[in-house]
């Protein structure tokens, strides 16, 4: 009997979905808009994260060593730095590399190259390019470097200069901008998601409100609550599935159209490529959201009319 | 079989729908309840369907206090009663066949039983040819006959008909009453409320007259007297 009941509930849900065509269409439309919004939030957060990462990657500090600094000390310091949790990466540019880079940069500048030749020795010191895991951590890294003791062999410090102090204000401001953008992004996502859930819930409630007389008749005929609620939940499930498919289809041309613009504007992220590359994940999020929204809204909306033993539709 | 024991219903605005009603109905009886609008007829029936709770007193169905039944037993209890309303109350998105089949489905009947019983009962109310029509495609009399077919399909112990002819012309009224009479002759208890003097006078069955929530007359073979 259990399976017969399940079969009847599912069949009834499908039939009602089809016969209440207009109500189904209206519900699908609203849920589609909601899912489109949820999808847009996924793209929005992807673009935002990408843009913020780009910004973060632009922030770094350089440490210049004196020309006399022994390479062993420098590499030891590199090891120390890399063991710090705040440090994400340390790129070491040796004196020779710095010189080679200098030469390529000035390959058309004959006078400079000639002056370099006349010096006879490499005037450039080695340097580190350090990136922190968080923008706010540059200050502590800079402080760590300032406390690096003098070289083992001499009395003077091996560090010539650290450019953090020159860029301090800019780095701190950028850090605040990134944090602010992130908080704002999360706030927008939460608010939009909440609004869309409320809209879907109310639409489904209205759809079921039109069936309240039917529900009271079913009760009087002696239908148990699961028999009344079941088909509505199946309808909600179908709303979710259809809406998910429609919004996933709409995303295809929309992201293709916006792809070029986002790539130019945010430097590197193409939402169309992102959509195609992450389709599985986006498909799952949108479809599950649609089904959950449809089914739960239906469940809650019908419960209102199944209420207590003596509940009556006035 | 049905027993109202000192039943009163007072609504929150202090209006009295039922006032100390005592009433017993034996199995197989055909009881008509008459009275002006607001006399308490419909409230009386709703008490039996567990749609409303009495403010005082109890309603018994075969010695079971209906309003002491746990919530989960209400659906199976209601399946022992067939209900017919003035406004038909068919499920608008289901065909005539499906409306009747629904009552059987909720009673846990098999698909085979449904396939054999529904056409049979539709023939009984002379609507075999309208099986696949939706309620909106049927006349008032036809809708009421579908509603009757739905009410009797599970062979209930009692049929409650709340002004079933209120929206029908005289010809359809006569047909509906004839069908109810037939159901009664097959042994089902029938509880009918009506405003129709002609119906009551023609039936010559037990008549209960209500006024302001009280039973003022109870005649074994009564006429419509107000």
Image (spheres, rainbow, N blue to C red):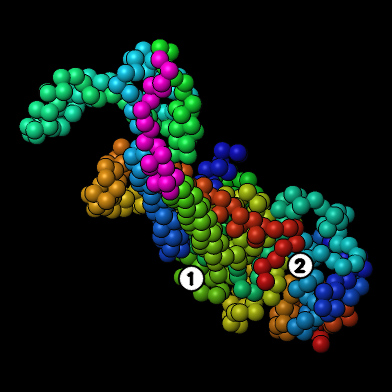
Residue A22 rendering spot, x and y as whole percentages: 42, 64
Q: Is residue B35 visible?
A: yes
In-image side of A111 versus A182 (left or right): left
**Residue placed under numbered mark 1 in the picture:** B136
Q: Separation of disc 1 and disc 2 at Cα?
A: 27 Å
Residue closer to the observer: A219 or A34: A34
The residue sitting at 89% across, 75% down in the picture is B19
Residue A275 rendering spot, x and y as whole percentages: 31, 43
Q: Residues within 10 Å of mark 1 (few under 14, many from 20)?
A: few
Work out which quarter of the rendered image holds the C terminus of chain B and state it: bottom right
Residue B187 image-quadrant placement? bottom right
Q: Secondary structure at mark 2?
A: helix
Q: Residues within 10 Å of mark 2 (few under 14, many from 20)?
A: some
Work out which residue is located at the far bottom of the displayed protein and give it. B226
Q: Which residues are magenta?
A: A154-174
Chain where mark 2 sits: B
Judge whether B105 appears above or below B181 on screen. above
Residue closer to the observer: A1 or A40: A40
Judge whether A236 appears above or below A65 on screen. below
Residue A241 rendering spot, x and y as whole percentages: 42, 48
Residue closer to the observer: A290 or A26: A290
Residue B173 rendering spot, x and y as whole percentages: 62, 78
The residue sitting at 77% across, 84% down in the picture is B36
**Residue placed under numbered mark 2 in the picture:** B46
Earlier-in-chain disc, 1 versus 2: 2
Residue A129 image-quadrant placement? top left
Chain where mark 1 sits: B
Q: Are marks 1 and 2 in contact (CB under 8 Å)?
A: no
Membership of B196 in magenta stretch: no
In-image side of B200 versus A180 (left or right): right
Q: Secondary structure at mark 1?
A: helix
């Amino acid at each position: 009997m259990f399976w017969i009941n399940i079969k009847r509930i599912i069949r009834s849900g499908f039939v009602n979905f089809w016969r209440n065509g207009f109500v189904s269409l209206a519900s699908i439309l609203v849920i589609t808009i909601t899912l489109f919004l949820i999808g847009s939030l996924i793209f929005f957060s992807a673009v935002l994260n990408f843009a913020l990462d780009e910004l973060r990657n632009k922030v770094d500090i350089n440490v210049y060593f004196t020309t006399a600094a022994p390479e062993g000390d420098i590499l030891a310091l590199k090891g120390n730095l890399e063991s710090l949790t705040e440090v994400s990466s340390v790129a070491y540019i040796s004196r020779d590399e710095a010189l080679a880079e200098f030469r390529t940069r000035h390959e058309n500048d004959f006078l400079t190259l000639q002056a370099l030749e006349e010096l006879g020795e490499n005037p450039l010191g080695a340097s580190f390019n350090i990136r922190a895991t968080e923008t706010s951590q540059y200050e502590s890294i800079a402080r760590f470097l300032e406390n690096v003791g003098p070289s083992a062999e001499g009395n003077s410090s091996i560090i010539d200069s650290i450019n953090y102090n020159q860029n301090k204000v800019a780095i701190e401001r950028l850090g605040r901008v990134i944090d602010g953008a992130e908080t704002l992004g999360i706030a927008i996502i939460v608010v939009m998601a909440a609004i869309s859930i409320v809209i879907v819930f109310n639409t489904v409630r209205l759809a079921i409100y039109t069936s309240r007389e039917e529900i009271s008749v079913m009760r009087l005929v002696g239908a148990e609550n699961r028999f009344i609620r079941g088909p509505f939940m199946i309808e909600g499930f179908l709303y979710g599935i259809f809406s998910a498919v429609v919004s996933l289809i709409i995303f295809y041309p929309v992201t293709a159209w916006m792809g070029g613009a986002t790539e130019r504007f945010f430097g590197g992220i193409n939402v169309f490529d992102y959509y195609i590359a992450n389709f599985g994940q986006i498909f799952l999020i949108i479809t599950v959201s649609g089904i959950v929204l449809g089914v739960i809204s239906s469940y809650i909306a019908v419960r209102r009319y199944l209420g207590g033993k003596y509940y009556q539709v006035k | 079989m049905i027993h109202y024991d000192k039943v009163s219903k007072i609504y929150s605005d202090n209006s009295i729908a039922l006032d100390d009603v005592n009433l017993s109905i034996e199995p197989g009886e055909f009881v008509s309840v008459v009275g002006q609008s607001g006399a308490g007829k419909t409230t009386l029936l709703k008490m039996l369907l567990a749609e409303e709770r009495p403010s005082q007193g109890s309603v018994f169905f075969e010695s079971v206090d209906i309003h002491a039944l746990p919530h989960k037993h209400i659906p199976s209890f209601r399946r022992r009663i067939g209900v017919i309303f003035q406004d038909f109350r068919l499920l608008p998105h289901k065909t005539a066949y499906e409306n009747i089949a629904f009552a059987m489905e909720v009673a846990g009947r098999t698909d085979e039983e449904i396939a054999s019983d529904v056409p049979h009962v539709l023939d009984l109310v002379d609507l075999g040819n309208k099986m696949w029509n939706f309620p909106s495609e049927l006349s008032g009399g036809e809708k009421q006959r579908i509603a009757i077919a739905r009410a009797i399909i599970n062979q209930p112990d009692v049929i409650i008909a709340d002004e079933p002819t209120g929206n029908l012309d005289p010809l359809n009224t006569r047909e509906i009453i004839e069908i109810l009479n037939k159901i009664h002759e097959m042994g089902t208890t029938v509880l009918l409320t009506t405003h129709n003097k002609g119906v009551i006078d023609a039936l010559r069955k037990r008549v209960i007259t209500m006024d302001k929530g009280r039973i003022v007359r109870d005649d074994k073979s009564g006429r419509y007297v107000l």
